[in-house]
């Protein structure tokens, strides 16, 4: 066996390489460091040391990995494996956080292309980056999933794993597998076993369920707290992560203090297949599409408002529309002073006998974009106004909004001059606002409501239909 530099492979290198492949990163670093201390700078040992730091996926370990790569290249500047690994490491980092590291990675790739442009290392550096060694969690999931998919009962699998770990008491990977299967063998861990055995199918199923929940809440305008049901849907995933994390913490407690060789023949971790990548991409796409669709749907609905074709009827209950009335002129002046949305139609009409001092029915209001106005906040405006004039409110109630929807608030009152009693109903929706005043002499609340609702209905036609 030869190292890349042509020197004989050291036992320390072989042990460190096996430990790295087994996921025992700390032990691999210790073995590589021992070899460097005893035998001096060897490129293979620097490569294992760097990759064992890199596999931790931690900023501090990444810095140590770069130091190992650069120390190895300082001693062996033309080593192809070191150059390829350093090029992949540097070019895979975040250029915004580590621009210097990324630049040095590109320089290593260029140097590799100069030394051996047709070598496998140069082709690798110019294409896909060298994959990181699998983390302990990845190895744990793979080992446990492989056992569960064989169809062996969880309790039997846990017993066999415990026997294997006892036969090789120094093997951390076997200890983690035994602790993991012991956790998963409990009856309560059945959901976690399903998640671990079929992670991509579960991810797609959860994405579809979460998307359906989000769209249902949006479509039916249900309370947003119902989205907390996502935590219930994801409970098996959280259980699986908790059990695996607990098993990784428990496993080292049973290992001997001294270090020895792990069990031979540990299988490699296969890469993610194209089918698995496709399922994961579909799950992500479902989530993103539902989130974007729900947000767009919610926004469009929040700015939407009912459009009306508005025209006051010429007659109402057999009474003609009055062309000129002192009371009508007062409300016309008030409407002209109000800040109304655009576009808008003013609604202003009085009905009664010609020459009468007081109209029998009076309507004032407007239509327009009121999507950002809460109807409940404006239906009390008329009451506030008449109370400021000294009028006495003798009754108030909320009426049914009818087919046009919104909110309707009605009241009866007497003016401060102790005139005849009057009734008024004020409606508000996100496309219109108005008040209908009628004489309340001998008239019930229901009659006041009906009169106001009828005049509102005759004045406003939803959509682009023609006016009455």
Image (spheres, grey):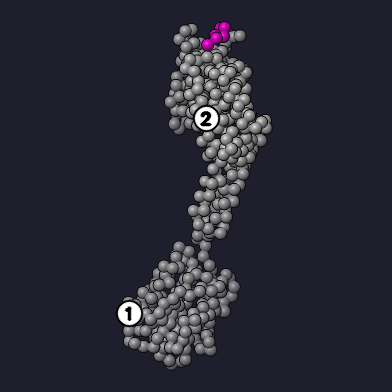
Q: Which of 224 and 263 is in front in this view?
A: 263
Left or right, 414 with respect to 217, comes to left
Q: What stretch is highlighted in magenta?
A: 5-12
Q: Residues within 10 Å of mark 2 (few under 14, many from 20)?
A: many
Q: Is the magenta region chiefly helix, strand or loop?
A: loop
Q: Residues within 10 Å of mark 1 (few under 14, many from 20)?
A: few
Using the image, determine if residue 7 lies above or below residue 297: above
Look at the image and say whether residue 6 sits in the magenta stretch: yes
Q: Name the residue under label 1.
A: 389
Using the image, determine if residue 226 lies above or below residue 171: below
Q: Using the image, tell me which numbered label, if any, was put on residue 247.
A: 2
Q: Position of residue 242 (x, y in %)?
A: 51, 36
In percent of the image, x 57 and y 79: which residue is there?
468
Determine the image quadrant of residue 217.
Answer: bottom right
In percent of the image, x 50 and y 20: which residue is there?
255
Q: Is mark 2 on a helix, strand or loop?
A: helix
Q: Is residue 73 visible?
A: no
Q: Do the residues labelled 1 and 2 touch (CB within 8 Å)?
A: no
Left or right, 41 with respect to 284, comes to left
Using the image, determine if residue 238 lies above or below residue 227: above
Tell me the distance, in whole angstroms, between the alpha carbons under discs 1 and 2.
77 Å
Q: Position of residue 408 (x, y in %)?
A: 47, 73
Q: What element carries label 1?
A: loop
Q: Where is residue 195 in the image (x, y as percent from the top left)?
A: 59, 38
Look at the image and say whether residue 398 sits in the magenta stretch: no
């Amino acid at each position: 066996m030869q190292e890349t530099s042509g020197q004989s492979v050291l036992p320390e290198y072989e042990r460190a390489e096996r430990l790295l492949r087994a996921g025992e990163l700390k032990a691999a670093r210790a073995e590589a460091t021992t070899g460097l201390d005893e035998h001096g700078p060897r490129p293979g040992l620097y490569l294992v040391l760097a990759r064992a730091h890199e596999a931790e996926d931690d900023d501090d370990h990444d810095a140590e990995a770069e130091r190992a790569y650069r120390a190895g290249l300082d001693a062996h500047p033309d080593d192809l494996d070191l150059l390829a690994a350093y090029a992949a490491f540097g070019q895979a980092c975040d250029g915004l956080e580590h621009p210097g590291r990324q630049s040095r990675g590109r320089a290593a790739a260029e140097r590799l292309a100069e030394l051996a442009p047709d070598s496998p290392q140069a082709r690798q550096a110019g294409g896909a980056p060298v994959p990181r060694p699998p983390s302990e969690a990845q190895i744990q999931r793979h080992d446990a999933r492989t056992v569960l998919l064989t169809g062996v009962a969880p309790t039997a699998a846990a017993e066999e794993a415990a026997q294997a770990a006892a036969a090789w008491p120094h093997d951390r990977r076997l200890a983690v597998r035994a602790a993991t299967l012991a956790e998963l063998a409990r009856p309560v861990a059945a959901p976690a076993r399903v998640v671990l055995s079929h992670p991509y199918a579960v991810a797609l199923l959860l994405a579809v369920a979460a998307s359906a929940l989000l769209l249902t809440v949006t479509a039916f305008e249900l309370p947003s707290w119902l989205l907390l049901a996502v935590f219930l849907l994801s409970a098996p995933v959280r259980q699986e992560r908790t059990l695996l994390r607990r098993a990784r913490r428990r496993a080292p407690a049973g290992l001997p203090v001294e270090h020895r060789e792990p069990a031979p023949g540990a299988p490699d971790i296969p890469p993610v297949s194209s089918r698995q990548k496709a399922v994961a991409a579909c799950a992500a796409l479902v989530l993103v599409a539902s989130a974007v669709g729900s947000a767009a749907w919610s926004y469009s609905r929040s700015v939407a408002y009912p459009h009306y074709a508005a025209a006051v009827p010429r007659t109402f209950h057999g009474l003609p529309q009055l062309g000129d009335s002192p009371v009508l002129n007062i409300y016309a002046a008030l409407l002209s002073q109000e800040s109304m949305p655009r576009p808008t139609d003013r609604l202003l009409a009085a009905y009664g006998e010609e020459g009468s001092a007081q109209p029998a029915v009076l309507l004032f209001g407007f239509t327009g974009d009121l999507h950002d106005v809460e109807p409940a906040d404006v239906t009390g405006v008329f009451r506030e106004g008449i109370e400021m004039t000294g009028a006495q409110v003798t009754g108030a109630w909320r009426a049914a909004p009818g087919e046009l929807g919104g909110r309707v608030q009605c009241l009866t009152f007497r003016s401060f001059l102790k005139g005849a009693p009057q009734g008024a109903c004020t409606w508000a929706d996100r496309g219109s606002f108005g008040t209908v005043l009628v004489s309340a002499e001998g008239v019930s609340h229901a009659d006041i409501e009906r009169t106001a609702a009828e005049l509102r209905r005759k004045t406003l036609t939803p959509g682009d239909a023609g006016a009455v």
